[in-house]
Image: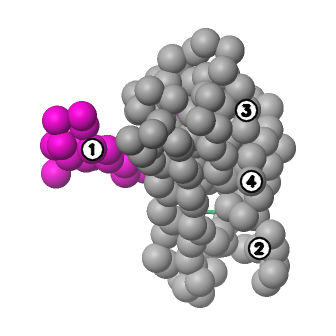
Amino acid sequence: DQHAVEFHVDHAMGTVGAVAIDAEGDLFAGTSTGGTCCKHSGRVGDSPLIGCGCYADAQAGGVSCTGLGEAIMRVVLAKTAVEFLRAGKSAQETAQACTKLLFQRGRGTGGLILLDRNGVPGFSFNTSRMAFGYVSPDGSYVIEPHQ
Ligand code: ASP
């Protein structure tokens, strides 16, 4: 309950995730980590675990997640999102179903960005704030919160 500044020095730079589709339709996903507060040194979070912090499958979609790693790992969030896409949910339906699952079954907060196999983006988060953006087919940049 007492989040003193010294608990935040190691993750002051935050986290960045990215998902891309190339001209051949191959999908790529990556997630960095800024770490999270009050964890033991050496803890392995969701970010380096394929299927948790990120996952990509050219037949379904690519996903990058962040938030409370233990909750993301509990529901294998990125792979779960890809399976929702494979089952026919839209990109945005998938993103929203994932943050609901993260909260209800994972018992945590976070968010995700994704592209389906056609390059359609989806985003959702259940934290107070998570910035995201994408390049639209016409080459323009869409950034939220709007700048
Ligand atoms: N998901 C990361 C972790 O729990 C934290 C973050 O980078 O936002 O390790």
Q: Is mark 4 within 8 Å of ligand 1?
A: no
Specify the label residue 43 is tagged with: none
| Rendered location of residue 78, percent (x, y) | 67, 41
Distance from Cα at disc 4 to Cα at disc 1: 25 Å
Residue ID at (77%, 73%): 39
| Rendered location of residue 97, percent (x, y) | 61, 23
Magenta range: 123-147
Image position of 65 with respect to 46: above or below: above
Q: Residues within 10 Å of mark 4 (few under 14, many from 20)?
A: some
Q: Which residue is mark 1?
A: 135
State how the image is colored.
Answer: one colour
Residue ID at (62%, 43%): 56
Distance from Cα at disc 1 to Cα at disc 2: 35 Å
Along the horizontal axis of the image, is 127 left or right of 40? left
Residue ID at (47%, 36%): 25
SS under mark 3: helix
| Rendered location of residue 91, percent (x, y) | 49, 24
Judging depth in this view, the residue of 22 and 90 nearest the camera is: 22
Q: Residues within 10 Å of mark 2 (few under 14, many from 20)?
A: few
Distance from Cα at disc 4 to Cα at disc 2: 21 Å
Q: Which residue is mark 4?
A: 50
Along the horizontal axis of the image, is 49 left or right of 99? right
Along the horizontal axis of the image, is 22 left or right of 125? left
Identity of the residue furthest to the front in this view: 24
Q: Which residue is mark 3?
A: 80
SS under mark 2: loop
User: What amino acid is labelled 1 in the image?
Assistant: Val
Q: Residues within 10 Å of mark 1 (few under 14, many from 20)?
A: few
Along the horizontal axis of the image, is 93 left or right of 41? left
